[in-house]
Amino acid sequence: MFKVSYNRALLRFRLETVTPLAIRAGETGLDPTAVDLACVRTNHVQHGTTVYIPGSSLKGVIRSAAEAAVRGRTFRHLGGQETSGACDPLDHRASCARHAPKGREQVPSSSVHQRNCLACRAFGSLSIKGRCALRDLFPFSRAGELSDDDRSNLERANRVELRHGIAIDRISGAVAGKALFEQEVIPVGVRFYGEATLHNYQAWQLGLLFTVFDELDQGFAQLGSSKSRGQGVVSVTPLSLVHEQRTGHARSPKAVGDLVDDATRRDYGLFAEHPLPAAPGAPRGLSSRFEVDPEHIGAWRNAGLHALGQLHGASQEAR
C-alpha cells in the first residue's frame, strides 16, 4: 500500500496542560543534585535545552485509547473477510506480528494488510507500517524567531515545579524503601504544539484519531506518569489540516478507498469509504493540496467520526 502515494494529511494541533504534567526522563545521570524523577528534555538547536513531549509518548497514549475503543469487535471489510478491532500486542501467538513474513518467505503485502486488525492498520505492527505518525511536541508554535507569546510560554514550560512524595507499602501501609522522593512537573497552562500525519488513509482512520483527541480533551485519557494522582490532564485544540493527493484526482479531497481500483480495495481488505468535505485545492508539484482552515476542521472531524460510526454500526461483538 505504501509503494504508491495516494493521499496524505497533516493535522497540526495545540496541547495545553490542565493539570501538572510529568513525562519522566529515562536517567538523571551522575549529578548528585539532580532530582529523582526529572522531566524529559532535549537540546533544541535554536532555543537551547527545553522540556518537550516525545511523539512516542503521545502515540502510545493514542494507540492505547484507540485499541480500547475497538477491542472486542469484528468488522467485515470489502474483501468479505472479518477483521478484529484490536489484537493483543503482548501475545505474539495471537497478535498481528504473527503475520510478518519469516525468513525468505514471500507473502503479498495485500494479504498481510488484510489480516491485520484495525488498530495495527492505523498505528502499525511488526508486520505492517502504520498510517499514523506523531511528531515531538515543543512549547513554541514554530521554529525560528519566537514571538513574545511563544517566548513567555517557553519560559513557563521550563520553570518546572518540584513536588515531594513518599512511597507507601500497599500491604503494610508503612513507608517503603526510600521515604522521600522528588519529582519535576510541568506547570498548568503551558502550551505544546505538535503534528500528526496520516499516509494513504481511510476516512475512519481520521475519525479514530479525532476520537482519541476528544478523549484527551475531555480528560478520559491522560499523559505521562502519576495519572492516578490527578496529573496528565490536557486539552487538545486542532489548529490546521492539510490534505494532499495525486493530481489525477484533484477536483475534491478523497480518502484512499476512493483513489484505488476495485481489485486493490478487495485485496487489501479496505472498508467502504466515506466522502471527505470539500476544500479549496491548488496544484503542488505532482500532487494537489487542500488546506482546511480552523473553522472547517470540525466538518472533517465529523466526516471521520461518521465513517468510524459506520464501521461500528456494521460490527459484531466478539463472542
Image: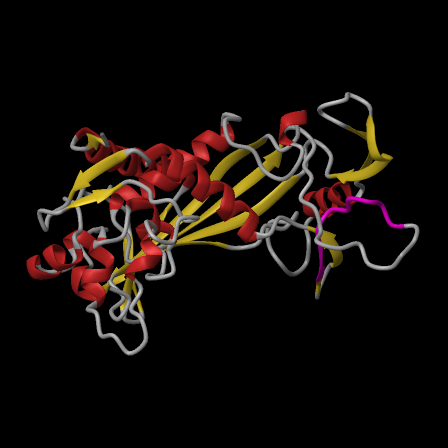
Residue 40 is covered by the magenta coloring: yes
Give me the residue at 57% from left, 54% from top: 136
Give the prevailing secondary structure in the magenta stretch. loop
Horizontally, residue 216 falls left or right of residue 52, namely left
In the image, 193 versus 312, the foreground residue is 312
Res. 318 visible in picture? yes
Of all residues, the one furthest to the right in this rendering is 33
The part of the image, by quadrant, that contains residue 235 is top right
Quadrant for the C terminus in the image: top left
Q: Residue reaching furthest bottom?
A: 104
Task: Report x, y in % for residue 193.
Answer: 57, 47
Percent from the top left, x then y, of residue 123?
38, 51
Could you tell whether 157 is left or right of 72 in the image?
right
**Is the residue 95 above or below the residue 144 in the image?**
above
The foreground one among 99 and 173 is 173
Residue for point 50% across, 46% down: 60
The location of residue 166, given as percent across then percent down, is: 82, 29
The answer to whether one can see residue 295 in this image is no
Residue 254 part of the magenta-drawn span: no
Q: Which residues are magenta?
A: 34-43
Q: Is 250 on the left or on the right of 284, as rendered?
A: left
Colour scheme of this structure image?
secondary structure
**Quadrant hosting residue 29:** bottom right
Residue at horizontal 18 percent and vertical 61 percent from the top: 111
Point out residue 134 in the picture as x, y percentages from the top left corner.
48, 52
Q: Quadrant of residue 77?
A: top left
Using the image, determine if residue 138 lies above or below residue 306: below
275, 257: nearer the viewer: 257
